Image (spheres, rainbow, N blue to C red):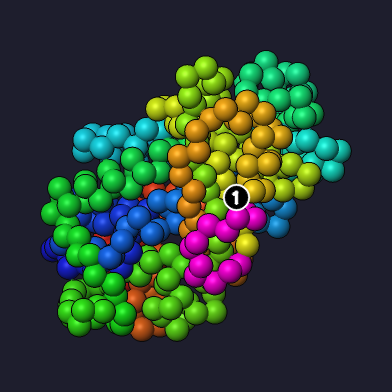
Amino acid sequence: MRSQREIIVVGAGVIGCSIAWRTARAGHRVTILDPDPHASASWVAGGMLAPIAEAWPGDEEALRLGLDSIERWPRFAAELAEDGHDPLLRTEGTLLTGVDTADREVLDTLAGYLDHLGHPVEKLTGSRLRRMEPLLGPAVRGGLHMPGDLAVDNRALLRGLLAAATEHGAAHVPERVTEIGARRVRTEQGTVFEADSVVLAAGAWSARLHPELAETVRPIKGEVLRLRARRGSLPPQGKTVRGIVHGRPVYLVPRADGEIVLGATQYEAGFDTAPALGGVRDLIADAETLAPSLADYELTEVCAGVRAGSVDNAPVLGALSDGVIAAAGHHRNGLLLAPLTADRITEMFLEELV
Ligand code: GLY
C-alpha cells in the first residue's frame, strides 16, 4: 500500500461513514465533511438488509450486488462491535405478506422469479403467518418467508460508524461542501480542504455536487414513522414484516428496545424532506391493515428523507472523469450495500486504481 493517503469523504450517511471507518481502520488519514449526518436517508431508514425481499424481475444487478454485500454484513457488524459499537444486527428474517388477490399475485411473481434464480422461498398461509407473528391481523391472506434477510438498527449503526471512524483517527468537520474536485473541496464557509483523493458519498445531494451525477442520481422521497409499544399493547413482532396492501408496499422493522420502524412511501418530490400528510396517512392505514393492534402504539416520530435513486438502481462506484471518486446512487439499498461499497473503495486505494 502507498503509505498513508489523505482522503476526504463528502457525506456522513451510511456509505460515507462506512468508507471513512474502513479507510481510517486501514491506516489512511480521513476527513469527513457533513453539516448534518441526521439529514441522510440512512438516518431516516428502517434498517432492512433485504436483497431477497427487494428482488424484482429486471433488477438482477441489484440482486447480485445485494447478495454479495449481505454475505459481508455479519463480519462488518462483528468488526464494528469489536471496535466497541455494536450495530444490533437482527437475524430473524423477513415475512413478505399480501392482503388481496392482486397482492398475492405479486408475491407469486416474486416467488417464481426467485425460484427460477435458485433462491426458493417458502409460501405461507395467513393462519400460519399469524401463528408465527401474532401481531398480524385477519386481513393478511398469505405470504413468503425469507429467513436469510437481515436488519440492523440504522441509527446505532450510523452513530457507531462515525464514532469508530473518529477513534481510528478520522476527523468530522460539520461543514457543507459546495465545490468538489479530485484533490480539493471548498465549503459553504469558504474553507478549502486538500487531500490525495476525494470520495463523493453525499447520497442524493451528490447530483448537485458533480455534473456527471446530475443526470444519473436523483432524490426519491420517503416518509417513515417510528412507533413504540405501550403497556398492555401486543409486543412488536420478531421478524421484519413487509406487506403489499392493496398494491402499496409497507414495512414494519422491529427493534430490540420495543420500537417499530414503519416505512416507507416512495415518490419524486425534489429535495423536499418535509413529511406530507398523505404519505403518513397511507403508512398508518396500511400498517393497521396488516397489524390492527398497532393502533394502541405510541407514534414517536414522523420524518422523511430522500434516497439517492439511480438510472438502473445500481450504485455509481469509482473515479469520474475528473478523478473524483463516486460512491452514490444506492437507492433503496444503501444500508445493505455499505459493506460491499466500503470494501470496493478501500480495495481501489490498496491497488492504487484511483
Ligand atoms: N430500503 C427501504 C426503503 O428504501 O424504503
The residue indicated by pointer 1 is 280
Residue at disc 1, secondary structure? helix
Q: Look at 29% across and 46% down and name the residue there.
A: 159
Is residue 76 visible from the viewing direction of this image?
yes
Q: Is residue 273 shown in magenta?
A: yes
- Vertical side of 26 occupied by 315: above or below: below
Give the magenta range.
268-280
Figure disc tally: 1
Q: Look at 67% across and 48% down and name the residue there.
A: 282
Rendering coords of residue 78 (x, y %): 31, 34
Rendering coords of residue 304 (x, y %): 50, 56
Q: Is residue 109 shown in magenta?
A: no
- Vertical side of 102 occupied by 182: above or below: below
Rendering coords of residue 153 (x, y %): 40, 38
* Image quadrant occupied by the C terminus: bottom left
- Vertical side of 132 occupied by 257: above or below: below
**Which sits in the foreground, 242 or 185?**
242
Rendering coords of residue 192 (x, y %): 18, 80
Q: Look at 66% across and 29% down and name the residue there.
A: 291
Which quarter of the picture shows residue 29?
bottom left
Q: Disc 1 beta carbon < 8 A from ligand 1?
A: no
Q: Look at 50% across and 61% down and name the residue there.
A: 274
**Which sits in the foreground, 230 or 235?**
230
Q: Residues within 10 Å of mark 1 (few under 14, many from 20)?
A: many
* Image quadrant occupied by the N terminus: bottom left
Type of the residue with mark 1: Val
Q: Is residue 210 left or right of residue 234?
A: left
Q: Residue furthest right?
A: 101
Q: Is residue 60 left or right of residue 299?
A: right
Is residue 26 visible from the viewing direction of this image?
no
Q: Is residue 178 left or right of residue 275?
A: left
